[in-house]
Amino acid sequence: MQLTFYGVRGSIPTPGEDYVRYGGNTACVHVVSSDGTDIILDSGTGIRLLGQQLIKKTTPIHILLTHNHWDHIQGFPFFTPIYQSGREINITPGLTTLPEHDAILKQMQGSVFPVPFSVLQSKISITPVPESTNHWQIGSASIARLPMNHPGKGSAYSICDKGIKIAYITDNELYPPYKKETDFLTFVDFARDADLIIHDAQYMTSDMPAKSGWGHSVAEEAVKLAMACNAKRLALYSHDPCRTDNDIDDIVAHCNEFISAAESPLNMFAAYEGLSIDFSE
């Protein structure tokens, strides 16, 4: 498998000179499975640049959505493959409290977007996976799903292929003040022995308690989860729009001190746009 980050920012895009190294686009990760299948995790603004690459192909595209908050779907109208005649695009909506499975399309109607989804020439299918179904297959990849702790709920995903495991757990509050959909130990089982965990790290301890209940984790909690999972690598993700490149550097340094104190072999880094990981190497 190969994975590339196209959007790593939470909440809202952040252009500007202080956001160049990590990037300002919202959530989007591209995975190419061992059989060449294109799987996209979320459709934030980062998907626009990904579309410029995938427009060169004609094969089906699979999009796994965590939830319908705008920073996770707002790039879809600018994803050029949806304008390709006959291009097959399969969308799996997240497990949200309100089953608004077509929210990604409805944002392209009324007075808020000039091109209605009804005129798209691609073959778009939205297929909710029953809540009782925990595992399914996309090409050579085995997909698993787990409810996450976020206002309005949503889905975490794992992708396993040829012995490689990726866990994508973003917009997830590991210790929320509201009723948990999934507890810490269940997340540990879900992501156990992952080659890479991509986890929400939007906040720091200093942001609390003001942002408790907003649906995001502090970076130290993400590190704790990755170490408990015996994961090889952790990518801090969903960077707060207020964090500059230097701020994120400081978070990485702080978390690495935490990892060193625990004498853990975990390889931790902050996700940045354009970072590509080839798991065959």
Image: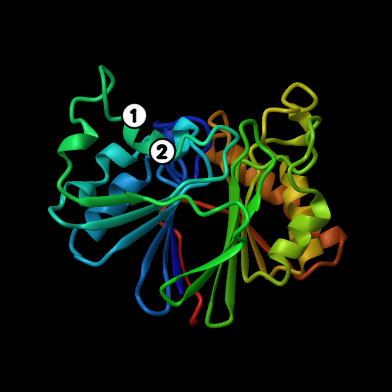
Does residue 76 appear in this view? yes
Q: Count the marks: how many?
A: 2
* Image point (51%, 76%), residue name: 279
**Residue 185, x across and y down, in percent:** 83, 56
- Could you say which is closer to the camera, residue 95 or residue 241? 95
Residue identified by numbered label 2: 73
Q: Residue 140's quadrant in the figure? A: bottom left
How does the figure colour the protein chain or chains?
rainbow
Where is residue 8 shown, x and y percent of the image?
49, 46
Q: Are marks 2 and 1 in contact (CB under 8 Å)?
A: yes
Instruction: Inspect the image, locate mark 1, and give the three-letter code of the amino acid beneath it.
Output: Gln
Q: Is residue 111 left or right of residue 192?
A: left
Task: Answer left or right for 38 relative to 129.
Answer: left
- In the rendered image, is residue 258 in sight? no
Q: Secondary structure at mark 2?
A: loop
**Residue at image coords 68%, 35%:** 203
Image point (56%, 42%), residue name: 238
Label 2 to label 1: alpha-carbon separation: 9 Å
Q: Is residue 216 left or right of residue 105?
A: right
Question: Residue 103 is drawn in which quadrant?
Answer: top left
- Residue at the spot of label 1: 107
Q: Mark 2 vs mark 1: which is more N-terminal?
A: 2
Q: Is residue 204 above or below residue 276?
A: above
